[in-house]
Image (spheres, grey):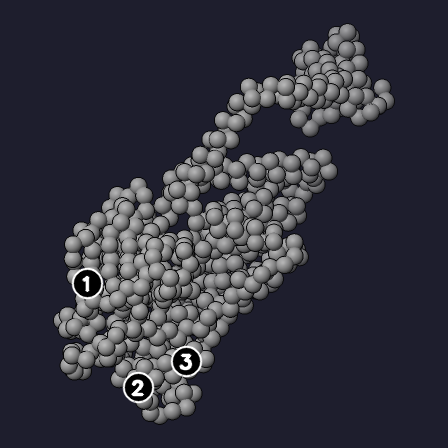
């Protein structure tokens, strides 16, 4: 393969590796190997025809495939994304290092497109944009080179400049068309697809950072800044808890947390309260005082769960939603019964009071342990034995064997777990791949922390459950945007005196984004990040505003000759003058070329594609041509060479 083409393919594969690396899904050890093999591609290509090289390479291919198969047998489909990206990336590296002279890189181009497409769903930060732009350029340049450069042909400086100019113009055109399609083509990122509608179970709907089920080890929460809901404070001044409840989960089966309803839920409502429809709202009874009122607007049309702040006392339907479309549950969550055809995002209002009830349980009597059994159930096997080990460690860290109250014990164990384990997103170095890994000491994200705390508390015979939803700092500002990256899982603990209260063992992830930035590059980075967030979180209203802006700009351009006739006339005169200057510079050369082509046609001979004008003249002199035609061809050849090559011998 031509070295220039191979170098272009090498740059393309490097951008593919950049796409994979920014997803934080593939372990760094794999990426180091792939980057090294890609960087050495030009050197390794010298040994591609050697038997020992092919044997060694195929053995490495077999080893990697064996590792992936072994990993799949252990974790099932939990890490299919990671293994799939590893396989796709290795295919790119394999093709790059084994393409021969007569092989076309079409499969490499197609695989490159698939990697760029898949990784966009898992990295919507501005860094994706910074990788996407050079990827488009490398993809177009490599495809162009693979088409026009054959064998060992060397590109001239003129051809290289032309190639770069064409690739830049096509890159700008591609990015422009992509941006226009993004604005003008209606889209719904959370639209129910074919697989969701026909292949998934009904309980799996509404996955927008939280789900009816939590599958440990899977990337269930999208880690991006797309806004899924907005919260506006209507009244009150006391800040409320930032926990927005979506669903509760009670039972761990294998690697899944699921919700299992039961008759005991009705009994527990005597302690926790329940929503009763009164007039135009759902009201919590027994009644609790409310301190603030908020309006919540659903921006993600795929969300079928309503986000209710902890301490919600009443729920009212708003714009785009009716009370009949809201279903309240015994665990004090709510969902949309049917998905209405919405042209605007639905809204609802909630009244929020203190999370901890006042004097709850004084007249309710004692609750039987049997009524709480599903909140005390522990899985069998290795999970239970590892839970016992973790309980001993946390009790030792807590520094006590007996506690005055249940809440004191829960808070002590929660703090101990938060300090004993570190936070890590899926795919990061040291991140747990299963609940067993986390119990053994690996890092993990919120679902692992919540799962471990539930197991520890249940081992201590404390009833609890998992809650999935979103967590923002505090509901104190006038307006708060809830983003996909705010998806969270935490624990609710039941006490006969306190009812359900929150326990969150997840430590705060390191986030320096709120620190004040200094310097030019920091401000540029913030500007790019803000621009990209506005693009990825563009709602229906944002798309309409963007279209109005483009149409307004078009109207300004069309009406410019009328509103500014003097400036328009000046611009026209400058454009005409520029065209005339360029044409006058080319007139001599163009006329010489036209005269030469006319002289060639008059001879009746066909000039070869690789035949120079001088070679064609020599061949024409051997033919039986009229002397006048031959003399005209000779004069046209000399004039052509003089104009094009700045002089030549006659």
Disc assigned to residue 415: 3
Quadrant for residue 540, please give it.
top left
Disc 2 target residue:
405
User: From this viewpoint, which residue is outermost toward the bottom?
Assistant: 401
Quadrant for residue 469, please give it.
bottom left
Q: Answer above or below: position of 493 versus 188.
A: below
Disc assigned to residue 275: 1
Tell me the element at label 2. Answer: loop
Q: Nearer the viewer, mark 1 or mark 3?
A: 1
Q: Residues within 10 Å of mark 2 (few under 14, many from 20)?
A: few
- Which of 493 and 214 lies nearest the eye of the viewer? 493
N-term mark: 2 or 3: 2
| Residue located at (70% from left, 41% from top) | 154
User: Can you give x and y, in whole percent of width and height, for residue 563 in the image?
Assistant: 56, 21
Q: Is residue 549 visible?
A: yes
- Which of 82 and 367 lies nearest the eye of the viewer? 367
| Residue located at (51% from left, 68% from top) | 510
């Amino acid at each position: 393969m031509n070295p220039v083409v191979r170098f272009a393919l090498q740059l393309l594969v490097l951008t593919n590796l950049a796409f994979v690396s920014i997803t934080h899904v593939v372990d760094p050890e794999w990426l180091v190997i792939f980057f090294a093999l890609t960087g050495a591609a030009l050197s390794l290509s010298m040994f591609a025809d050697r038997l020992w090289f092919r044997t060694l390479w195929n053995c490495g291919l077999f080893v990697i495939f064996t590792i992936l198969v072994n990993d799949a047998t252990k974790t099932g489909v939990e890490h299919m994304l990671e293994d799939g990206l590893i396989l796709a990336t290795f295919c790119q590296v394999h093709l790059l290092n084994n393409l021969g002279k007569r092989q076309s890189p079409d499969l490499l181009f197609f695989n490159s497109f698939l990697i760029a497409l898949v990784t966009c769903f898992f990295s919507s930060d501005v860094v994706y944009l910074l990788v996407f732009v050079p990827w488009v350029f490398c993809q177009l340049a490599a495809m162009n080179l693979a088409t026009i450069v054959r064998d060992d042909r060397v590109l001239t400086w003129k051809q290289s400049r032309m190639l770069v100019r064409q690739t830049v113009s096509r890159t700008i055109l591609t990015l422009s068309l992509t941006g226009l399609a993004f604005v003008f083509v209606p889209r719904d990122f959370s639209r129910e697809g074919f697989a969701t509608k026909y292949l998934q179970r009904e309980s799996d709907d509404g996955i927008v950072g939280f789900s009816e089920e939590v599958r440990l080890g899977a990337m269930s929460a999208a880690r991006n800044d797309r806004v899924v809901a907005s919260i506006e404070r209507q009244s009150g001044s006391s800040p409320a808890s930032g926990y927005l409840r979506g669903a509760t989960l009670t039972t761990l089966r294998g690697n899944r947390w699921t919700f299992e309803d039961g008759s005991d839920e009705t009994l527990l409502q005597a302690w926790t309260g329940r929503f009763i429809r009164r007039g135009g709202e759902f009201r919590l009874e027994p009644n609790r005082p409310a301190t603030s009122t908020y309006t919540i607007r659903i921006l993600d049309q795929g969300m079928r769960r309503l986000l209710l702040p902890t301490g919600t006392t009443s729920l009212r339907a708003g714009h785009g939603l009716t009370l009949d479309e809201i279903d309240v549950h015994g665990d004090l969550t709510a969902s949309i019964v049917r998905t209405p055809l919405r042209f605007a995002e639905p809204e609802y209002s909630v009244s929020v009071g203190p999370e901890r009830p006042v004097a709850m349980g004084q007249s309710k009597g004692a609750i039987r342990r049997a009524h709480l059994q599903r909140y005390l159930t522990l899985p069998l096997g290795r999970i239970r034995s590892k839970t016992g080990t973790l309980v001993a460690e946390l009790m030792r860290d807590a520094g006590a064997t007996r506690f005055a109250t249940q809440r004191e014990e829960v808070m002590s164990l929660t703090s101990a777990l938060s300090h004993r384990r570190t936070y890590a997103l899926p795919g990061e170095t040291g991140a747990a791949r299963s609940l067993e890994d986390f119990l053994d000491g690996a890092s993990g994200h919120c679902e692992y922390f919540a799962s471990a705390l539930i197991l520890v508390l249940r081992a201590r015979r404390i009833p609890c459950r998992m809650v999935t939803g979103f967590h923002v700092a505090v509901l104190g500002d006038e307006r708060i945007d809830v983003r996909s990256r705010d998806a969270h899982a935490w624990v609710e603990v039941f006490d006969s005196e306190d009812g359900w209260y929150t326990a969150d063992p997840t430590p705060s992830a390191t986030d320096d984004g709120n620190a004040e930035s200094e310097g030019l590059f920091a401000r540029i980075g913030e500007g790019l990040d803000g621009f990209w967030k506005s693009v990825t979180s563009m709602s229906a209203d944002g798309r309409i505003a963007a279209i109005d802006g483009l149409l307004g700009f078009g109207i300004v351009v069309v009406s410019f000759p009328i509103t500014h006739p003097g400036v328009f006339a000046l611009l026209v005169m400058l454009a005409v003058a520029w065209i005339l200057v360029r044409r006058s510079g080319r007139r001599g050369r163009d006329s010489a070329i036209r005269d030469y082509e006319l002289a060639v046609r008059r001879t009746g001979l066909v000039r070869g594609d690789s035949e120079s004008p001088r070679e064609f003249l020599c061949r024409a002199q051997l033919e039986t041509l009229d002397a006048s035609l031959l003399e005209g061809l000779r004069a046209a050849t000399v004039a052509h060479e003089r104009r094009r090559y700045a002089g030549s011998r006659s």
